[in-house]
Image: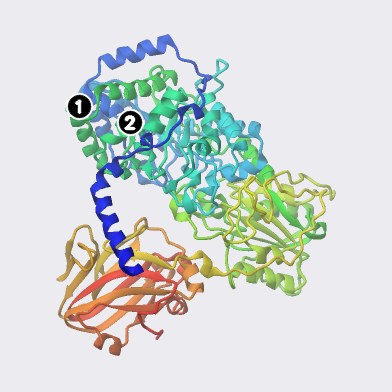
Amino acid sequence: MNNLKRTSLFCVCMVSLLSACEQSKRLETTADKDQDPTIWPNIVSEIEKSEEVESQVKALLAEMTIEQKVAQMIQPEIRDITVEDMRKYGFGSYLNGGGAFPNGDKHASVPDWVALAESMYQASIDASMDGSTIPTMWGTDAVHGHNNVIGATLFPHNIGLGAANDPALIEKIAQVTAKEVLATGIDWIFAPTVATVRDDRWGRTYEGYSEDPEIVGDYAYAIVKGLQGDGNSNTVFKEQHVISTVKHFVGDGGTLKGDDQGNNVANEETLFKVHAQGYVGGLKAGSQSVMASFNSWHGDKIHGNKYLLTTVLKDQMGFDGFVVGDWNGHGQIHGCTNDNCPQAINAGLDMFMAPTQSWKALFYNTVSQVEDGTIPLSRVNDAVSRILRVKIRAGLFNKPGPAQRLYAGDSKIMGSDQHRALAREAVRKSLVLLKNKAGILPLSPKQNILIAGDGADNIGKQSGGWTITWQGTNNANADFPGGTSIYEGIKQQVLKAGGDITLSPDGSYDKGNKPDVAIVVFGEEPYAEGQGDRPHLAYQYGTNKDLTLLKSLKAQGIPVVSLFISGRPMWMNAELNASDAFVALWLPGSEGGGVADVLLKDNNDSIQYDFTGKLSFSWPNSPTQHVNRFDGQTPLFEYGFGLDYETKDTLQDSLSEYFDISASVNEVELLYDGQPKKPWALYLTESNDRKPIRSNSEQLNGVDYRTIDRFVQEDSLQLSFSDEKIAGIQLLSKHGFPEDLSAYVNSSAYLTFDISLKSGSISKAYIGMNCQEENNCSSQVKIPDEKLSALTSDWQQLAVPLTCFASLGAELSQTMSPFKLSLAGNAEVGLSKIALRASTSEASIVECN
C-alpha cells in the first residue's frame, strides 16, 4: 500500500471514529480532564457575609414566582427594551453597551441619563404588572472613566496605567470614576478588566495592565476598593460608591495567536498563576460581580464551563456574589443560541447579558426550562440569591430613586477640574521614554516648535476605543468638552513661555521660519475588541505616511521627537531610527496637557516632571516576536524599561528594518466555504441594492441565490440571473468595522474563487474589494472576455493579484468588503472557496486592467 492510500484509509477511519464520538466530545467539559481545584486559593473577602443580609435574601426569595426569579437573571440593553418592558418583566438589571445612549442621542446630557435611570427604577419597583418591587440596577462599561458620556473625564487606558505602576493612583481614579458614574444615575460598573495579556496581537491588549500578573493583582485590589469602598472599614457601599465587576473570568488574555474570544490552552496551574491573579486581588477586596469570558479553555466556552464557574470560582475561591455573562456570550456555547441556553445557567452563570430582542424568547424559554426541570430550581434559587445579596449589600433596597441620590444630575462633577487634574497626573506617570538621543528632551518651551502628525490635535485618537462610541470612532474634538489635545496642551505652555508653535499635520511650514524641533504625534486608529486583532506587530511596513513624514523632517535638519499613540507595543524600528526621541504615549485619554508637563521645561528651563513610566509589556524585537517577561526571549526593550532624564540613551539609529511580511500571513485564508468566515457576512446584490443572506435560498429583484453541493452538503452557492441584470454576491464586515488585509498585498497574494458556468452565458463580470464607502477607496477589476468565454460547467479557479486592487485605490488596511462579484448576462453560476492565497499554481490569473 503506498503512502497516499495509507493516509487516505487512515483519514476515512478517523472520520468514522470522530463521527461516532462527535456528540460525546462536544459535550465534554474541562471537568472531564485532569483537574485540581486545590491549585486555586480560598479567598476571604473583606466584605463579610451578614446574617441580616442572608435573612433578607431568604425572605425575598420565598415570595418570588419563577417568572420573577428568571427576570432577575436577564439583563437586556437600553436600545432593545422600554420602560414598559421593565414594568412588565421586572428585570434584575439592564445595561448600555458601547455607543448606546438615552434616547439614542450621543450628546445626551447628564440629566437625560438620570431621567432614564429614574424611569427604569420606578418601573422596576412598580408591582402593578409583574408583582415585584425589587429594584433594578444599571450596568455600564466605564473602563477608563465614564467613557460613554460626553464631557466625562477620560483616564489613560489600562496599558498606560500599568506603566505607571501606582496602585494608590489607581484607587483614586476608581473613586473619581464612581462619582461621575453616579452623577448619571448608574449603579454598577463592568470594571476592572484584569486580563494578563500574553500575545499583543490581541485587540484588547490595551485593556490589560500588564503581560505579567505582578501588577494586575495589586491593581485589581485597588480598583475594587476605590469603586466599592473599603471592606475593612465602614465606607463600603456608601453613597459615593458603585458595584464593581472583575472581568473576564478567565484566561481571555492568553488565547492562541491573540484571537479575541479564542481558545486558551494553558494548563490549570498557569491559568491560575498567570491569568487569575486579578481575581485574587479583586475578590479579596470584595468585588460583588464577576463577568464570564468569551474565550474557551481547551475548547470549552467559559460561559458553559461548570468546573471553572462553579467548582473553582464559587466553591473553591469562595465567591458569593453573582456571575454575569458577556454580550450574548451564552449563545456561543455548543448547542445554545442567544435565546435558549440552559447549559449556561446549569454551569454557574447567574445572569444572562442578553442585548438585542433575543431577551424576550430567552426569558420564556428559561421559565419553561425551570418548570420542566431542565434547569433545577435549586440552581435558579442560588443564582437569584446571589443577585439579591449584592443588591442588599449595595443598599439598593434602601436608597431612593437614582434622581434623588448623591451626585445625581450634577453636571459639575462630570469632568470637574479636580478630576481632570488627577487624569493629567495619570498621563504624566504613564508615559514611557524609549529613546532620547543626545538628551534632546526635555524641550525648552521658548523654542520654535512644529507639531505634526494626524494625532497631534485629535482627542478621539489619543483616547482610543471605548470612547463615547464602542470603537472610539466617529468622534471630533467638539465631542470632548473640557478635554485637551496633545497639541493644545503643548501650545498652552509654549505660548506662555514666549515660544512659537505651529500645528501642521503634514509637516509643512513657512520656509522662512524653520522650526527648532518637530514633535510628531502619530499611531494606531481607535478600535475595540476583535476589531483590533492583528496578524503581526509591525506598525506600518514598507513606505508609510508616518515614516515618510519623520524622514522628511530629519532630512531637513530638524530634530524629531516622536510621540506614539498605541494600544500595544509594536515593532517600528524604522520609526525609531528616524526619531531623535521616542515616547510611548499609549492611549492617554482626554488630558493631553499631561504630555506637555513631562516633555517641556518650565519658563526657567527647569524640568517640570521627569519620566517615571516603565514598560509593563515587553517591546518586540521583530514583527512576529511574541515576548513576555521571563520567557527566555530577548525583546528590543525589556519589561520594566523606561528612560528618565538622568539616564544616558545608548540606542543607535541602526535597528534592523527588514520584515518578511509573507511570514506573517496564512498560506490560505478562507473567506467563504459554504459559510462566510469570521468576521464576514454574505449579501446578495443587484444594481445598487443588497440583501443579507440568512437562509439557503434568497431572492433580490429577480436574482436568485441558493446553496448547492460540491464536495459536501451545501458547501457552495449558485446565482441565477437574467435580462442582463448587474447582480452578484458580496462579503461585508459583519460588525461594520474594517479589517486590515494589507499584509497580503505586500506578500503578493491573490484573491481567488472557484467558479462554474452551469448554464447560459455571462456578458460582463467584475471583481471588487472595498473599504468604507465614504472614503472613496473602492476598486474593481474586469474579468476579460476570453476568461468568461473559457468558463464551463467544470469548476475552475480564478485569481486576482491583490496588488491590482491596491493599485486601483483600495486601502486594504481598511477593508470593509474583501470580495464583490458583479455579473451581467443570462446564466446560472456556481461559486465556491472564496479565499486569500499567498500563492496559487492552479488558478487562471486575472491581470490588472
SS at circle 2: helix
Residue 118, image quadrant: top left
Mark 1 sits on what residue? 373
Residue drawn at point x = 51 percent, y = 40 percent: 143
Residue 698 shows in this picture: yes
Q: Nearer the viewer, residue 137 or 567?
A: 567
Above or below, comparing residue 45 to residue 477 in the picture: above
Q: In which quarter of the image is the C terminus?
A: bottom left
Foreground residue among 167 and 2: 2
The numbered mark at residue 243 is: none
Picture disc at residue 120: 2
In the rendered image, residue 20, in percent from the top left (x then y), is placed at 23, 48
* Residue 319 drawn at (x, y percent): 45, 24
The Cα atoms of the two marked residues, 2 and 1, are separated by 32 Å
Residue 816: quarter of image: bottom left
Which corner quadrant holds the N terminus? bottom left
Q: Which amino acid does label 1 sit on?
A: Gly
User: What percent of the width, then of the height, locates residue 516?
Assistant: 78, 65
Residue ID at (62%, 58%): 456
Helix, strand or loop for disc 1: loop
> Does residue 26 appear to the left or right of 645 in the view shown?
left
